[in-house]
Amino acid sequence: MTVVQVVPVLKHGRVSIRPIRVRDARPLERELIANRSWLERWEATSPYGPVQSDTKASIRSLQNHARSGGGLPFAIEFDGEFVGQLNVSGITYGSVASASIGYWVSERVAGHGITPTAVALATDYCFTQMQLHRMEICIRPENAPSLRVVQKLGFRYEGLRRRFIHIDGDWRDHFCFALVREELPHGVLARWLEGQVPVDAGRVPDADRDAAATPFPAPTGR
């Protein structure tokens, strides 16, 4: 049976996340153009060649994914202004009951706690309202701002995934972080705001940092 996802409106302080709409296409395009150099290193690409970008079609695809039960596509707002996106994807129920989170915000509002607040709101909703058990975030080792987000919120480091996602024109390594529901009896947002996140949460072992900095071995001929 298909579970149609109702994308909620969630808010804390000056930060809110809400369902992305087709009429967000114009502000989304403005932000993507203004933040080209800020975002392009982290954008997913296709190993099969360039893909034409159509903002409205992309939003409709996200909405269709939500209607089919596979995702929750959010717009991130700061003081009511569109500043980024957050997507909960790969929603799976049953014995797995998990999902993944991806996100970006405009460089001009970075440093205001917007991204960790948005991620915490979405994660708490998935745990409490959707009854998911595990939430995962995978981040390129070079993406220091995103790594700070998972460290602030206490996502637990789970390992290095070699050549995991095609990003910026090649297959890129990612560090994997996750939380399970029973780790957060009072919620992700509350634990962060109350200063209860473990100091070493999200710490990546030096061995994995070294491995990620080492070029992946090229295939050898026979």
Image (cartoon, helix red, strand yellow):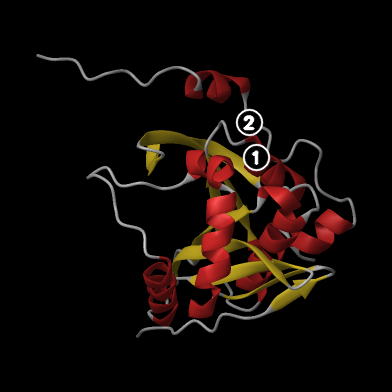
Q: Is residue 134 visible?
A: no
Rendered-image quadrant of the C terminus? top left
Q: Which residue is drawn at 76% across and 46% down?
A: 152
Against 211, is 180 above or below?
below
Q: Residue placed farthest to the right in the image?
A: 194
Badge 2 density bin: few <14, some 14–19, many ≥20, Cα 10 Å: many
Amino acid type at circle 2 is Val
| Residue 167 image point, x, y percent | 41, 41
- Which residue position is annotated with label 2? 204
- Which residue position is annotated with label 1? 147
Badge 1 density bin: few <14, some 14–19, many ≥20, Cα 10 Å: many
Amino acid type at circle 1 is Leu
Residue 176 versus residue 132: which sits nearer the camera? Answer: 176
Query: Viewed as shown, does residue 178 lie left or right of 172?
Result: right
Q: Distance between the residues labelled 1 and 2?
A: 10 Å
Against 36, is 85 above or below?
below
| Residue 25 image point, x, y percent | 50, 71
Q: Can residue 166 be seen in this view?
A: yes
**Contact, CB < 8 Å: mark 1 with mark 2?**
yes
Q: Residue at x 67, y 59 (%)?
A: 119
| Residue 21 image point, x, y percent | 52, 78
Please tell me in which quadrant of the rendered image residue 181 appears.
bottom right
Q: Which residue is drawn at 28% across and 47% down?
A: 50
Q: Residue at x 72, y 55 (%)?
A: 116
Against 220, is 131 above or below?
below
Residue 181 versus residue 62: which sits nearer the camera? Answer: 62
Against 69, is 204 above or below?
above
